Image (tube, helix red, strand yellow):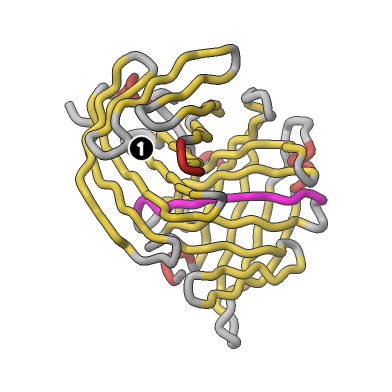
Amino acid sequence: MTAFLGSWLVSEYVYNPNGALVGVVHQRRELARLPNGNLRVWQFCEPCDFEHPLAKREGEYVFELQVEGRARRYLGPDVIGSGLNWGEGVLTARGLWPRLGHNFTSFSVQTGAERQVTGGKFFNASEMVANIVGVAEVKRENVKAEGWPKLEGPILAQETSERWCGTARTVDAGGKVIAERVVERRYSGLGWEDSDEAGAVRLTENGDRYFFSTANLAGLAKRMGWLMEIEAFGAGGVSVEWLEVVDGAELIGLRRRKCDEVIQQVEILQLKPQG
């Protein structure tokens, strides 16, 4: 967690459940080590110029974060819950913002020493209020309001390049890296083909969603700007929760594979355009 200490600037793109962009929440984030070894996190959310339940998040929020092995425990007062680390700079979590009045799920992937892709959902119990995809960068002394980090460029990876290459790291349920391999992806229309076991992916547009299929899985996909989320199912109790974020010249993927509702492994994909 040392890499996350200090001052960060965060931009969170807020989408309604139907996939429509509502606005952007900007926040300053400060992290400091406490004498007991925990972290104190301050989030200072700027006033919003749009109407939405998350626009009420403006102002200061503070919570303590305990790190114990892979576990991340949010001890309050303004955020309570827990998370799991899936390798260097990769985290999934869930919990509650008591003062804001919404529960949440979240993910974050550190893509460099000074940049992090984030996202998640806010709920009223099981009713989704918002879907978020965002980006955080280390704050520089001379950064002004216009220096907020941005997600820019095409929201579709194939509009940047039809060919992407990079790595896929597989982590088992206990957090141990069990494989790391080179992956090449080639896009064709809305779908693509990966050189690993994911193979050929077919997407068929259907209103504000997509039907998703591979040789072994069938499911649904939904796009929120630069974020695509997929839930797919196969034989033998297999299910996959799959998300991908296009961050300019980088594509970040996170795939959680389950069997009979128990996590078996998590795959972290990082690709860059070729040609």
Query: Residue 38: x and y, percent?
Result: 58, 78
Q: Could you tell me which residue is drawn at 78 percent across and 31 percent down?
A: 51
Can you say whether 158 is above or below 198 in the image?
A: above
Can you say whether 49 is above or below 70 in the image?
A: above
Which residue in the rendered view is the most extreme toward the bottom? 35
Give the residue number, with chain letter if any, for mark 1.
Answer: 251
Q: Could you tell me which residue is drawn at 34 percent across and 14 percent down?
A: 189
Query: Residue 184: x and y, percent?
Result: 22, 35
Indicate left or right for 141 with 27 as reference: left
Which span is picked out in magenta?
101-112
Query: Residue 168: x and y, percent?
Result: 29, 47
Indicate left or right for 43 with 255 as reference: right
- Mark 1 element type: strand
Q: Main secondary structure of the magenta part?
A: strand
Residue 4 visible within the image: yes
Q: Could you tell me which residue is drawn at 39 percent across and 20 percent down?
A: 202
Compare residues 157 and 34 and report the one nearer the observer: 157
Crowdedness near tag 1: few (<14), some (14–19) or many (≥20) residues, C-alpha within 10 Å: many
Q: Amino acid at mark 1?
A: Leu
Compare residues 122 and 60 and report the one nearer the observer: 122
Compare residues 217 and 16 and report the one nearer the observer: 217
Indicate left or right for 18 with 203 as reference: right
Which residue in the rendered view is the most extreme toward the front? 236
Query: Residue 66: x and y, percent?
Result: 59, 75
Q: Could you tell me which residue is drawn at 59 percent across and 58 percent down?
A: 29
Q: Is residue 74 magenta?
A: no
Residue 154 visible within the image: no
